[in-house]
Amino acid sequence: MANRIPVGILGATGMVGQRYISHLADHPWFELAYVAASPRSAGKPYAEAVENRWLIGPDVPAAATRLTVSDANDAKAAAGKCAFVFSALEMDKALLQALEESYAAAGIPVVSNASAHRWTPDVPVLIPEINPGHLAIIEAQRRKRGWGKGFIVAKPNCSIQSYMMPLFALTQAGFPAKRMIVTTLQAVTGAGYPGVPSFDITDNVVPYIGGEEEKTEKEALKILGSVEGGAIRNAPAPLIAAHCNRVPVIDGHVACVSLEFDAAEGAKPSLAQIESVWTRFRALPQELRLPSAPDAPIVVRHEPNRPQPRRDRETGKGMTVVVGRLRECPVFDIRFVGLSHNTKRGAALGGVLNAELLKAQGFFDRL
Ligand code: NAP
Protein backbone atom coordinates (compact mmCIF):
# COMPACT_ATOMS: atom_id res chain seq x y z
CA MET A 1 0.00 0.00 0.00
CA ALA A 2 3.08 2.28 -0.08
CA ASN A 3 3.30 5.06 -2.68
CA ARG A 4 -0.43 5.28 -3.24
CA ILE A 5 -1.72 8.23 -5.28
CA PRO A 6 -3.48 10.85 -3.11
CA VAL A 7 -7.05 11.45 -4.32
CA GLY A 8 -9.88 13.81 -3.45
CA ILE A 9 -13.67 13.41 -3.45
CA LEU A 10 -15.98 16.32 -4.30
CA GLY A 11 -19.43 15.63 -2.86
CA ALA A 12 -17.84 13.33 -0.28
CA THR A 13 -20.78 13.63 2.12
CA GLY A 14 -23.47 12.45 -0.33
CA MET A 15 -24.76 9.00 -1.26
CA VAL A 16 -22.16 8.39 -3.97
CA GLY A 17 -19.42 10.22 -2.05
CA GLN A 18 -19.90 7.82 0.87
CA ARG A 19 -19.50 4.84 -1.48
CA TYR A 20 -16.21 6.36 -2.66
CA ILE A 21 -15.02 6.81 0.93
CA SER A 22 -15.91 3.23 1.75
CA HIS A 23 -14.29 1.72 -1.38
CA LEU A 24 -11.12 3.81 -1.17
CA ALA A 25 -10.54 2.95 2.50
CA ASP A 26 -8.29 0.04 1.46
CA HIS A 27 -7.61 0.67 -2.21
CA PRO A 28 -4.20 -0.61 -3.39
CA TRP A 29 -3.41 2.34 -5.74
CA PHE A 30 -5.34 5.34 -4.36
CA GLU A 31 -5.23 6.98 -0.95
CA LEU A 32 -8.04 9.21 0.32
CA ALA A 33 -6.39 12.59 0.94
CA TYR A 34 -9.03 15.29 0.44
CA VAL A 35 -12.79 15.58 0.93
CA ALA A 36 -15.03 18.46 -0.11
CA ALA A 37 -18.75 19.21 -0.18
CA SER A 38 -21.09 22.21 0.04
CA PRO A 39 -20.43 25.26 2.22
CA ARG A 40 -22.93 23.67 4.67
CA SER A 41 -20.41 20.91 5.44
CA ALA A 42 -17.17 22.84 4.89
CA GLY A 43 -14.97 23.28 7.94
CA LYS A 44 -16.43 20.27 9.78
CA PRO A 45 -14.52 17.07 10.56
CA TYR A 46 -15.79 14.48 8.03
CA ALA A 47 -17.46 12.27 10.69
CA GLU A 48 -19.36 15.28 12.03
CA ALA A 49 -20.42 16.37 8.53
CA VAL A 50 -22.06 12.96 7.92
CA GLU A 51 -23.39 12.49 11.46
CA ASN A 52 -26.81 10.78 11.32
CA ARG A 53 -26.50 10.32 7.54
CA TRP A 54 -23.61 7.85 7.19
CA LEU A 55 -25.30 5.02 5.29
CA ILE A 56 -22.65 2.37 4.60
CA GLY A 57 -21.96 0.04 7.53
CA PRO A 58 -21.74 1.02 11.17
CA ASP A 59 -18.79 3.43 11.17
CA VAL A 60 -17.05 6.01 9.01
CA PRO A 61 -13.71 4.48 7.83
CA ALA A 62 -10.67 5.69 9.76
CA ALA A 63 -9.10 7.12 6.58
CA ALA A 64 -11.94 9.67 6.43
CA THR A 65 -12.30 10.54 10.12
CA ARG A 66 -8.93 12.31 10.13
CA LEU A 67 -10.01 14.66 7.31
CA THR A 68 -11.79 18.03 7.48
CA VAL A 69 -14.34 18.84 4.77
CA SER A 70 -13.35 21.64 2.38
CA ASP A 71 -15.62 23.78 0.20
CA ALA A 72 -15.88 22.03 -3.18
CA ASN A 73 -16.45 25.39 -4.87
CA ASP A 74 -12.81 26.32 -4.28
CA ALA A 75 -10.64 24.31 -6.70
CA LYS A 76 -7.44 26.03 -5.55
CA ALA A 77 -7.90 24.60 -2.05
CA ALA A 78 -7.35 21.11 -3.49
CA ALA A 79 -4.13 22.03 -5.29
CA GLY A 80 -1.11 20.19 -3.91
CA LYS A 81 -3.31 17.91 -1.77
CA CYS A 82 -4.50 15.39 -4.36
CA ALA A 83 -3.37 14.20 -7.79
CA PHE A 84 -6.96 14.07 -9.11
CA VAL A 85 -10.54 14.29 -7.83
CA PHE A 86 -13.67 12.19 -8.14
CA SER A 87 -16.69 14.47 -8.65
CA ALA A 88 -19.87 13.24 -6.97
CA LEU A 89 -21.55 16.63 -6.71
CA GLU A 90 -25.25 17.26 -7.12
CA MET A 91 -25.84 20.86 -8.15
CA ASP A 92 -27.03 23.12 -10.97
CA LYS A 93 -25.68 21.88 -14.32
CA ALA A 94 -24.09 25.14 -15.50
CA LEU A 95 -22.47 25.75 -12.10
CA LEU A 96 -21.17 22.21 -11.98
CA GLN A 97 -19.76 22.40 -15.51
CA ALA A 98 -17.86 25.55 -14.55
CA LEU A 99 -16.74 24.02 -11.25
CA GLU A 100 -15.36 20.82 -12.82
CA GLU A 101 -13.59 22.96 -15.43
CA SER A 102 -12.01 25.07 -12.69
CA TYR A 103 -10.39 21.91 -11.23
CA ALA A 104 -9.09 20.84 -14.65
CA ALA A 105 -7.78 24.37 -15.24
CA ALA A 106 -5.99 24.19 -11.87
CA GLY A 107 -4.17 21.07 -13.12
CA ILE A 108 -6.38 18.59 -11.24
CA PRO A 109 -7.99 15.89 -13.44
CA VAL A 110 -11.70 15.27 -12.74
CA VAL A 111 -13.24 11.78 -12.87
CA SER A 112 -16.91 12.70 -12.73
CA ASN A 113 -20.10 10.88 -11.82
CA ALA A 114 -22.26 13.86 -12.65
CA SER A 115 -24.19 14.42 -15.86
CA ALA A 116 -22.96 18.03 -16.28
CA HIS A 117 -20.32 17.27 -18.94
CA ARG A 118 -21.71 14.09 -20.49
CA TRP A 119 -22.83 16.00 -23.58
CA THR A 120 -19.68 18.08 -23.94
CA PRO A 121 -18.35 16.79 -27.31
CA ASP A 122 -14.71 16.41 -26.20
CA VAL A 123 -15.48 14.78 -22.82
CA PRO A 124 -15.48 10.98 -22.95
CA VAL A 125 -18.31 9.10 -21.22
CA LEU A 126 -16.38 6.08 -20.12
CA ILE A 127 -17.24 2.45 -19.38
CA PRO A 128 -13.76 0.85 -19.39
CA GLU A 129 -15.01 -2.48 -20.78
CA ILE A 130 -16.62 -0.70 -23.74
CA ASN A 131 -14.91 2.46 -24.95
CA PRO A 132 -11.39 2.80 -23.47
CA GLY A 133 -10.30 4.17 -26.87
CA HIS A 134 -12.29 7.35 -26.19
CA LEU A 135 -9.54 8.42 -23.77
CA ALA A 136 -7.57 9.41 -26.87
CA ILE A 137 -9.65 12.61 -26.94
CA ILE A 138 -8.09 13.89 -23.72
CA GLU A 139 -5.16 15.30 -25.64
CA ALA A 140 -7.51 17.39 -27.85
CA GLN A 141 -9.53 18.42 -24.78
CA ARG A 142 -6.41 19.74 -23.07
CA ARG A 143 -5.16 21.49 -26.21
CA LYS A 144 -8.47 23.21 -26.95
CA ARG A 145 -8.85 24.55 -23.41
CA GLY A 146 -5.21 25.28 -22.67
CA TRP A 147 -5.17 22.82 -19.78
CA GLY A 148 -1.85 21.31 -18.71
CA LYS A 149 -2.26 18.27 -16.49
CA GLY A 150 -6.03 18.70 -16.01
CA PHE A 151 -8.85 17.01 -17.96
CA ILE A 152 -12.42 15.77 -17.43
CA VAL A 153 -13.71 12.24 -17.92
CA ALA A 154 -17.39 11.46 -17.18
CA LYS A 155 -19.23 8.30 -16.22
CA PRO A 156 -22.62 7.48 -17.74
CA ASN A 157 -25.94 7.46 -15.95
CA CYS A 158 -26.60 4.53 -13.61
CA SER A 159 -29.78 3.54 -15.50
CA ILE A 160 -27.93 2.38 -18.62
CA GLN A 161 -25.41 0.14 -16.86
CA SER A 162 -27.87 -2.76 -16.67
CA TYR A 163 -28.06 -3.12 -20.45
CA MET A 164 -24.97 -1.40 -21.93
CA MET A 165 -22.51 -4.26 -21.43
CA PRO A 166 -24.82 -6.98 -22.89
CA LEU A 167 -25.64 -4.65 -25.79
CA PHE A 168 -21.96 -3.88 -26.48
CA ALA A 169 -20.87 -7.54 -26.22
CA LEU A 170 -23.42 -8.42 -28.92
CA THR A 171 -22.37 -5.46 -31.11
CA GLN A 172 -18.74 -6.49 -30.85
CA ALA A 173 -19.63 -10.08 -31.77
CA GLY A 174 -21.25 -8.86 -35.01
CA PHE A 175 -24.85 -8.65 -33.78
CA PRO A 176 -25.62 -4.92 -33.42
CA ALA A 177 -29.06 -3.84 -32.29
CA LYS A 178 -31.30 -1.71 -34.49
CA ARG A 179 -34.08 -0.87 -32.02
CA MET A 180 -34.64 -1.38 -28.31
CA ILE A 181 -37.36 -0.76 -25.76
CA VAL A 182 -36.13 -0.64 -22.18
CA THR A 183 -38.18 -0.37 -18.99
CA THR A 184 -36.07 0.43 -15.94
CA LEU A 185 -36.99 -0.26 -12.31
CA GLN A 186 -34.64 2.02 -10.39
CA ALA A 187 -33.62 1.89 -6.74
CA VAL A 188 -34.16 4.78 -4.34
CA THR A 189 -30.44 5.34 -3.72
CA GLY A 190 -30.28 6.53 -7.32
CA ALA A 191 -31.92 9.73 -6.08
CA GLY A 192 -29.22 10.44 -3.48
CA TYR A 193 -29.92 10.94 0.23
CA PRO A 194 -32.54 11.53 1.61
CA GLY A 195 -33.91 11.21 -1.94
CA VAL A 196 -37.52 10.21 -2.58
CA PRO A 197 -39.83 10.93 0.40
CA SER A 198 -40.86 7.67 2.13
CA PHE A 199 -44.55 8.51 1.65
CA ASP A 200 -44.04 8.64 -2.12
CA ILE A 201 -42.12 5.37 -2.49
CA THR A 202 -43.34 2.96 0.21
CA ASP A 203 -46.06 0.67 -1.21
CA ASN A 204 -45.67 2.44 -4.52
CA VAL A 205 -44.02 2.75 -7.95
CA VAL A 206 -43.32 6.22 -9.37
CA PRO A 207 -43.40 6.12 -13.21
CA TYR A 208 -41.28 9.24 -13.66
CA ILE A 209 -37.66 10.20 -12.91
CA GLY A 210 -36.82 13.70 -14.16
CA GLY A 211 -34.41 13.67 -17.13
CA GLU A 212 -33.74 9.94 -16.84
CA GLU A 213 -35.44 8.72 -20.00
CA GLU A 214 -33.51 11.19 -22.15
CA LYS A 215 -30.20 10.04 -20.58
CA THR A 216 -31.16 6.37 -20.92
CA GLU A 217 -31.97 6.81 -24.61
CA LYS A 218 -29.03 8.98 -25.66
CA GLU A 219 -25.94 8.21 -23.59
CA ALA A 220 -25.58 4.74 -25.13
CA LEU A 221 -25.05 6.33 -28.55
CA LYS A 222 -22.13 8.47 -27.34
CA ILE A 223 -20.51 5.47 -25.64
CA LEU A 224 -20.85 3.38 -28.82
CA GLY A 225 -19.62 6.34 -30.91
CA SER A 226 -16.17 7.12 -32.27
CA VAL A 227 -13.51 9.78 -31.78
CA GLU A 228 -13.35 11.97 -34.88
CA GLY A 229 -11.08 14.98 -34.78
CA GLY A 230 -11.66 16.83 -31.52
CA ALA A 231 -15.10 15.36 -30.76
CA ILE A 232 -16.92 12.11 -30.11
CA ARG A 233 -19.42 11.36 -32.86
CA ASN A 234 -22.50 9.40 -31.72
CA ALA A 235 -23.24 5.98 -33.15
CA PRO A 236 -26.34 6.11 -35.41
CA ALA A 237 -28.02 3.12 -33.73
CA PRO A 238 -29.73 1.58 -31.85
CA LEU A 239 -32.89 3.63 -31.58
CA ILE A 240 -33.87 3.35 -27.90
CA ALA A 241 -37.22 4.05 -26.20
CA ALA A 242 -37.08 4.11 -22.39
CA HIS A 243 -39.62 3.96 -19.56
CA CYS A 244 -37.93 4.84 -16.25
CA ASN A 245 -39.62 3.98 -12.94
CA ARG A 246 -38.61 4.48 -9.30
CA VAL A 247 -39.31 1.39 -7.17
CA PRO A 248 -39.01 0.67 -3.42
CA VAL A 249 -35.60 -1.06 -3.62
CA ILE A 250 -32.54 0.28 -1.77
CA ASP A 251 -29.77 -0.65 -4.27
CA GLY A 252 -29.87 -2.28 -7.72
CA HIS A 253 -31.36 -1.01 -10.98
CA VAL A 254 -33.25 -3.51 -13.16
CA ALA A 255 -33.74 -3.08 -16.93
CA CYS A 256 -36.30 -5.11 -18.90
CA VAL A 257 -35.13 -5.00 -22.51
CA SER A 258 -36.73 -5.95 -25.84
CA LEU A 259 -34.24 -5.79 -28.68
CA GLU A 260 -34.32 -6.05 -32.46
CA PHE A 261 -31.11 -6.91 -34.31
CA ASP A 262 -29.97 -5.06 -37.41
CA ALA A 263 -30.64 -7.77 -39.99
CA ALA A 264 -28.66 -5.87 -42.62
CA GLU A 265 -25.52 -6.37 -40.52
CA GLY A 266 -25.68 -10.17 -40.62
CA ALA A 267 -27.56 -13.21 -39.41
CA LYS A 268 -29.51 -12.94 -36.17
CA PRO A 269 -27.93 -14.89 -33.31
CA SER A 270 -29.63 -17.81 -31.60
CA LEU A 271 -30.32 -17.60 -27.86
CA ALA A 272 -27.45 -20.06 -27.30
CA GLN A 273 -25.07 -17.84 -29.30
CA ILE A 274 -26.16 -14.80 -27.30
CA GLU A 275 -25.56 -16.53 -24.00
CA SER A 276 -22.15 -17.68 -25.19
CA VAL A 277 -21.22 -14.10 -26.24
CA TRP A 278 -22.24 -12.73 -22.84
CA THR A 279 -20.60 -15.47 -20.79
CA ARG A 280 -17.29 -15.24 -22.65
CA PHE A 281 -17.17 -11.43 -22.70
CA ARG A 282 -13.94 -10.04 -21.23
CA ALA A 283 -12.33 -6.65 -21.94
CA LEU A 284 -9.37 -4.38 -21.18
CA PRO A 285 -10.03 -4.01 -17.40
CA GLN A 286 -9.92 -7.80 -17.03
CA GLU A 287 -6.80 -8.03 -19.23
CA LEU A 288 -5.07 -5.32 -17.16
CA ARG A 289 -6.35 -6.88 -13.91
CA LEU A 290 -7.54 -3.49 -12.67
CA PRO A 291 -8.26 -3.76 -8.93
CA SER A 292 -12.00 -2.94 -9.17
CA ALA A 293 -12.66 -4.96 -12.34
CA PRO A 294 -14.85 -8.03 -11.89
CA ASP A 295 -13.51 -11.33 -13.26
CA ALA A 296 -16.69 -11.65 -15.33
CA PRO A 297 -18.32 -8.37 -16.48
CA ILE A 298 -21.55 -10.25 -17.37
CA VAL A 299 -23.03 -13.25 -15.55
CA VAL A 300 -26.03 -15.13 -17.00
CA ARG A 301 -28.56 -16.74 -14.64
CA HIS A 302 -31.05 -19.39 -15.71
CA GLU A 303 -33.61 -19.40 -12.90
CA PRO A 304 -36.93 -18.10 -14.26
CA ASN A 305 -37.19 -15.48 -11.48
CA ARG A 306 -33.69 -13.91 -11.58
CA PRO A 307 -31.96 -11.49 -11.55
CA GLN A 308 -33.32 -9.85 -8.40
CA PRO A 309 -31.78 -6.79 -6.70
CA ARG A 310 -31.54 -8.32 -3.21
CA ARG A 311 -30.09 -11.63 -4.38
CA ASP A 312 -27.87 -10.55 -7.28
CA ARG A 313 -26.65 -6.96 -6.86
CA GLU A 314 -23.42 -7.94 -5.03
CA THR A 315 -22.27 -10.30 -7.83
CA GLY A 316 -18.64 -9.49 -8.65
CA LYS A 317 -18.55 -7.17 -5.60
CA GLY A 318 -21.28 -5.07 -7.19
CA MET A 319 -19.41 -4.65 -10.49
CA THR A 320 -20.92 -7.46 -12.58
CA VAL A 321 -24.03 -7.01 -14.71
CA VAL A 322 -26.35 -9.95 -14.04
CA VAL A 323 -28.57 -11.01 -16.95
CA GLY A 324 -31.49 -13.42 -16.97
CA ARG A 325 -34.81 -14.28 -18.58
CA LEU A 326 -33.21 -14.41 -22.03
CA ARG A 327 -35.98 -15.46 -24.40
CA GLU A 328 -37.49 -14.75 -27.78
CA CYS A 329 -39.71 -11.71 -28.28
CA PRO A 330 -42.88 -11.87 -30.40
CA VAL A 331 -42.56 -8.17 -31.33
CA PHE A 332 -38.77 -7.62 -31.58
CA ASP A 333 -36.15 -10.45 -31.64
CA ILE A 334 -35.17 -11.12 -28.01
CA ARG A 335 -36.03 -10.10 -24.47
CA PHE A 336 -33.91 -10.15 -21.32
CA VAL A 337 -33.62 -8.61 -17.85
CA GLY A 338 -30.38 -6.92 -16.73
CA LEU A 339 -29.40 -5.86 -13.23
CA SER A 340 -26.56 -3.66 -11.97
CA HIS A 341 -25.69 -2.18 -8.59
CA ASN A 342 -26.44 1.52 -9.06
CA THR A 343 -24.18 3.01 -6.38
CA LYS A 344 -21.33 0.53 -7.07
CA ARG A 345 -21.02 -0.27 -10.84
CA GLY A 346 -23.42 2.59 -11.63
CA ALA A 347 -21.62 5.20 -9.53
CA ALA A 348 -18.61 5.13 -7.18
CA LEU A 349 -16.95 1.80 -8.04
CA GLY A 350 -17.53 2.49 -11.72
CA GLY A 351 -15.80 5.86 -11.14
CA VAL A 352 -12.88 4.15 -9.40
CA LEU A 353 -12.59 1.68 -12.31
CA ASN A 354 -12.40 4.68 -14.68
CA ALA A 355 -9.59 6.13 -12.56
CA GLU A 356 -7.77 2.77 -12.48
CA LEU A 357 -7.83 2.65 -16.29
CA LEU A 358 -6.58 6.25 -16.47
CA LYS A 359 -3.77 5.42 -14.07
CA ALA A 360 -2.86 2.24 -15.95
CA GLN A 361 -2.66 4.26 -19.17
CA GLY A 362 -0.42 6.93 -17.63
CA PHE A 363 -2.89 9.83 -17.37
CA PHE A 364 -2.14 10.73 -13.75
CA ASP A 365 1.02 12.36 -12.49
CA ARG A 366 2.01 11.89 -8.91
CA LEU A 367 1.89 15.09 -6.86
P1 NAP B 1 -26.39 13.49 -2.90
O1 NAP B 1 -26.51 12.34 -1.97
O2 NAP B 1 -27.49 14.49 -2.95
O3 NAP B 1 -25.00 14.25 -2.58
C1 NAP B 1 -24.71 15.51 -3.17
C2 NAP B 1 -23.32 16.01 -2.76
O4 NAP B 1 -23.12 17.28 -3.41
C3 NAP B 1 -23.16 16.26 -1.25
O5 NAP B 1 -21.84 15.97 -0.87
C4 NAP B 1 -23.41 17.77 -1.13
O6 NAP B 1 -22.77 18.36 0.00
C5 NAP B 1 -22.77 18.28 -2.42
N1 NAP B 1 -23.33 19.58 -2.82
C6 NAP B 1 -24.64 19.90 -2.99
N2 NAP B 1 -24.77 21.20 -3.34
C7 NAP B 1 -23.50 21.70 -3.39
C8 NAP B 1 -22.95 23.00 -3.67
N3 NAP B 1 -23.74 24.04 -3.97
N4 NAP B 1 -21.61 23.16 -3.63
C9 NAP B 1 -20.80 22.12 -3.33
N5 NAP B 1 -21.26 20.88 -3.03
C10 NAP B 1 -22.60 20.67 -3.07
O7 NAP B 1 -26.23 12.99 -4.42
P2 NAP B 1 -25.65 11.57 -4.97
O8 NAP B 1 -26.74 10.60 -5.18
O9 NAP B 1 -24.47 11.18 -4.14
O10 NAP B 1 -25.18 11.96 -6.44
C11 NAP B 1 -23.96 12.66 -6.66
C12 NAP B 1 -23.74 12.78 -8.17
O11 NAP B 1 -23.58 11.48 -8.74
C13 NAP B 1 -24.92 13.44 -8.91
O12 NAP B 1 -24.42 14.26 -9.93
C14 NAP B 1 -25.69 12.25 -9.47
O13 NAP B 1 -26.41 12.58 -10.64
C15 NAP B 1 -24.55 11.28 -9.79
N6 NAP B 1 -24.91 9.85 -9.79
C16 NAP B 1 -25.60 9.29 -8.75
C17 NAP B 1 -25.90 7.92 -8.77
C18 NAP B 1 -26.66 7.23 -7.64
O14 NAP B 1 -26.93 6.02 -7.78
N7 NAP B 1 -27.00 7.90 -6.54
C19 NAP B 1 -25.48 7.15 -9.84
C20 NAP B 1 -24.76 7.74 -10.88
C21 NAP B 1 -24.48 9.09 -10.84
P3 NAP B 1 -23.55 18.58 1.42
O15 NAP B 1 -23.66 17.21 2.04
O16 NAP B 1 -22.64 19.47 2.15
O17 NAP B 1 -24.88 19.17 1.09
Image (cartoon, grey):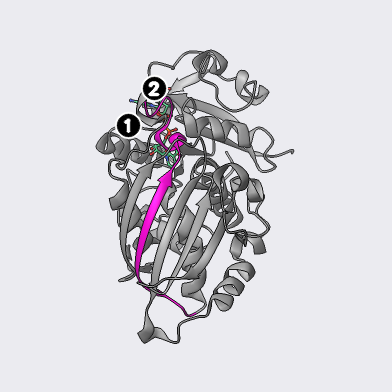
Q: Is residue 307 above or below residue 17?
A: below
Do the numbered discs 1 and 2 sit on residues whose CB atoms are within 8 Å? Answer: yes
**Residue type, mark 2 in image:** Ser
Q: Is residue 49 left or right of residue 320?
A: left
Magenta segment: 174-197
Residue position for label 2: 38
Q: Nearer the viewer, residue 311 or 231?
A: 311
- Mark 1 to mark 2 CA distance (whole Å): 10 Å
Q: Does residue 100 appear in this view?
A: yes
Q: Which mark is residue 306?
A: none
Tell me if residue 186 is in the magenta stretch. Answer: yes
Q: Quadrant of residue 332?
A: bottom left
Residue occupying the point 50% across, 69% down: 327
Disc 2 beta carbon < 8 A from ligand 1? yes
Disc 1 beta carbon < 8 A from ligand 1? yes
Question: Residue 94 appears at what percent x and percent y?
Answer: 25, 38
Few, some or many residues within 10 Å of mark 1 (<14, 14–19, 20+)? few
Q: Earlier in the sequence, mark 1 or mark 2?
A: 2
Question: Residue 292 appears at what percent x and percent y?
Answer: 63, 49
Question: Residue 116 appears at what percent x and percent y?
Answer: 32, 43
Q: Is residue 253 left or right of residue 140?
A: right
Quadrant of the rendering where the C terminus is positioned: top right
- Callout 1: helix, strand or loop? loop
Question: Residue 24 appears at what percent x and percent y?
Answer: 62, 36
- Callout 2: helix, strand or loop? loop
Ligand 1 quadrant assignment: top left
Residue position for label 1: 91
Q: Is residue 173 left or right of residue 207?
A: right
Tell me if residue 316 is in the magenta stretch. Answer: no
**Residue type, mark 1 in image:** Met
Q: Is residue 321 left or right of residue 79?
A: right
